[in-house]
Amino acid sequence: MARYLEAKCRLCRREGEKLFLKGSKCYSAKCPMEERPFPPGMHGQGRRVKVSNYGIQLREKQKVKRIYGLQERQFLGYYKDADKMTGITGTTLLQLLESRLDNVVYRMGFASSRTEARQIVRHKHINVNGSILNVPSYRVKAGDTIALVDSAKEHLRINASVEAAGQKGTPEWLDVDLQQRQGVYRELPARDQLDAGIREQLIVELYSK
């Protein structure tokens, strides 16, 4: 699968807002968005042009893709699944994205970013209901228990992430025991428990054309 290998901070600058792709760096003064809150490239500070409705919809889709670290084919697959399910398509799309194993590991505080969470999963540091899984896209279900394997509990970066999570807190739809390095995916998150800055209806409108 293709991967984005350039500086992730350029993605935030392109979207004009912090996407929190670099963990603790995004909360520090070292974040490029603090000094260069304009698109990358030699024309980044040039005259702004009026963006069409299509352009607005496209940028929103690109933003959400980058937040969750997905390629177009993957993201479209999630949209098609959401469109077939009952409920509001946009909300269902976000719930499916939040149910990815790498995202749940990140939300539980075992990693400082989704990229780091994906690496933790691929390195077989996570078990689900007692079985080790190394598939970041695995869809976690309500009642599933996610835990760090014993050998990963002493990793310095993981412990730093857990300590930060203890200060920031974890989402209401997860029951997390940071001391034991495990948690339970209690239920699908409600829309008001997710990022209010995402305008998922624009994505639905884009794909519905």
Image: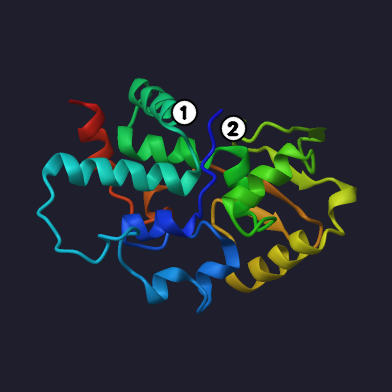
Q: Give me the residue at 82% from left, 35% from top.
A: 130
Q: Position of residue 160 (x, y in %)?
A: 73, 67
Q: State left or right for residue 43 relative to residue 68.
A: left
- Tell me the mark number nearer the camera, choosing from 1 and 2: 1
Q: Position of residue 154 (x, y in %)?
A: 87, 59
Image quarter where the C terminus lies is: top left
Q: Nearer the viewer, residue 49 or 68?
A: 49
**Of helix, strand and loop, which one carries label 1?**
helix
Label 1 crowd bin: few (<14), some (14–19), many (20+), radius 10 Å: few
**Of helix, strand and loop, which one carries label 2?**
loop
Mark 1, residue position: 74
Residue 58 location, quadrant:
top left
Q: Position of residue 21 (x, y in %)?
A: 51, 56
The figure's colour scheme reads rainbow
Q: Is residue 92 in view from this perspective?
A: yes
Q: Position of residue 76 (x, y in %)?
A: 38, 27
112 versus 69 height, above or below: below
49 versus 208 height, above or below: below
Image quarter where the N terminus lies is: top right
Q: Give me the residue at 75% from left, 59% from top.
A: 158
Residue ranking furthest to the right: 151
Q: Are marks 1 and 2 in contact (CB under 8 Å)?
A: yes
Q: Give me the residue at 18% from left, 43% from top.
A: 55
Of callouts 1 and 2, the N-terminal one? 1
Q: Which amino acid type is shown beneath numbered disc 2?
A: Ser
Residue ranking furthest to the top: 84
Mark 2, residue position: 137
Q: Which amino acid type is shown beneath numbered disc 1?
A: Gln
Q: State left or right for residue 203 relative to residue 165.
A: left
